[in-house]
Image (cartoon, grey):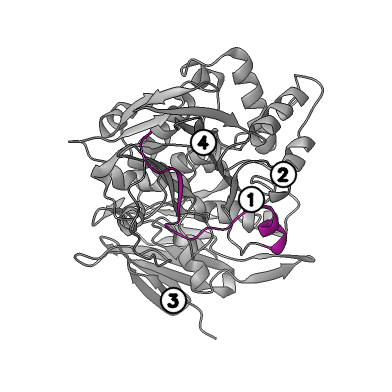
Amino acid sequence: MVSIIKRKVLEGVYWINIPDVDLRILCGCPADSIKHLTTKGLLPIVSEDGLEFESGPNAILLSDDLVQNGSLANASEFVAYHMFYTQGMIIPVHPNFKKPKPLMIGKKGQVDAQMEYIYRGNYGLTSEKEFIACGETDSFIKENIAMKLRFAQDNFLHTRDLVDAVYLDRKKVELRQGVFVRRIKHNVFTFYYQNKSVQVDLNLGKYRHYQPSFLLPQITIPNDYFSVIHTGEGDGWNPNKPSLSSVIQFDGHFFLIDAGPHIIKILKAVGLSPDQLSGIFMTHVHDDHFAGLFDLIDEKNPLTIFSTPVIRSTVVKKLAALLSVTEKKINSYFKFSDLKRNVWNKQSGMEIKPLPTAHPVDTTLFIFRAKGKKRYYSYGHYSDIVALSWLKTMIVDKKSKIGVSKKYFESVKADLEIVLDLKKVDVGGPTIHGDAEDFVNDKSGKLVLGHTHTPFTERQLAIGNEVTFGHVDTLIQKKP
């Protein structure tokens, strides 16, 4: 029996499996690594204690360099989520909860940065002080922290509490039960077990880049006054689609909603470049909506990020953690334009209403509208909502308890029921994503379904519409 199995996942990324000690190491971890593991068949369904679940990595070896050839080499958030939740390593009733903690392996600076960046991606803002710095009201702060704590099972655990750090220099370090690793030279590592050894080289070749797991068609978009270009309907797991995003075209301006992995390629596929964007609207900081921000950094001509102060703060804190720079430095990478929540904000003649919603990390829904000849036309971007059936289970009577009030639940429900001309909704499924059933009676002109990693069911398609990459929904064709 082979004691160490090595497979290439993509350029600069490898898979090491030592079955004898149940150790599976993802070596190199650019954004969307989990999608590539899926396409390679490295996340098989296993059965243990009567429960079926995906297997996958239980250790991550980070690149020595955060950035290679202009792209993030270390973006481990979704791999960590797969270990925590899909594989059940932090779920007390799960068989994997009994096993050793997953490992984060690499240079101390890189490991520590990944720990902090995953923490911010998991929870966003976690203290009253952080919310107060955003100018939020006492009632907003209390209800949002109580809601997020319920999602977090009553405690914001730091990544260091969930993952064991293994710091590497040039010495041989034992990982588990006789498995050792050593850095041979920059980004080159050797793994040892029994009398076998294998080497991995995480360096990208000259002019080489991390490739997406999906292919995109080239799209020519019409010159509309107000339209929505659908640039992603998948999630952080679906290897065949880019993550949920849209481009708003309004009166000659292009605005991006969220920036997931491979955002430059996504924009290029619809005939756009970053310098054509008038700004980015950020819903939240999970990597399938956030990781592409790095690719859009341009200190000479910084893009504007439009968000509520709470989302702006989470963007700054997570990006600062990832890049190991100060929050002040992040403010030189982008311009930030704060939007007031629950009211109409004007930008370049368009109006935008941000609506905070229930999610494990601070999240905003967006409604965009523009005046036509006779009325307003509207688009709602409802990314990362929660199924109402699940949110209902979080209702508590006493304010001191962790959860949500009935009033809060009704407010979230009312926001989901707003009638719009076009509405794109997350139907990724409970517990932390939406349910198509919540939109059975939706009176909007068109309902677009998104944020799934499986094909839509007949039932879902009876409720809403599937769109392909680059599909354009025109709201106002010509300037009134």
Disc number for residue 378: 4
Q: Residues within 10 Å of mark 1 (few under 14, many from 20)?
A: many
Q: Residue at x 26, y 49 (%)?
A: 273
Q: Position of residue 180 (x, y in %)?
A: 44, 66
Q: Nearer the viewer, residue 25 or 282?
A: 282
Q: CA distance from mark 4 to mark 2?
A: 20 Å
In the rendered image, which residue does mark 2 sit on? 438
Residue 402 magenta-highlighted:
no
Disc 2 secondary structure class: helix
Q: Residue at x 34, y 28 (%)?
A: 348
**What's the distance in space between the residues labelled 1 and 4, CA to CA?**
20 Å
Question: Could you tell me how far apart the alpha carbons at marks 3 and 2 are, in whole angstroms?
Answer: 45 Å
Pinpoint residue 445: horizontal percent, then vertical percent: 60, 44
- Check disc 4 and give the amino acid type: Ser
Q: Which residues are magenta?
A: 457-480
Residue bearing the label numbered 3:
6
Q: Are marks 2 and 1 in contact (CB under 8 Å)?
A: no
Lower position in the chain sequence, tag 3 or tag 4: 3
Q: Is residue 474 magenta?
A: yes
User: Mark 4 and 2 residues: CB-CB less than 8 Å, in contact?
Assistant: no
Q: Which residue is mark 1?
A: 427
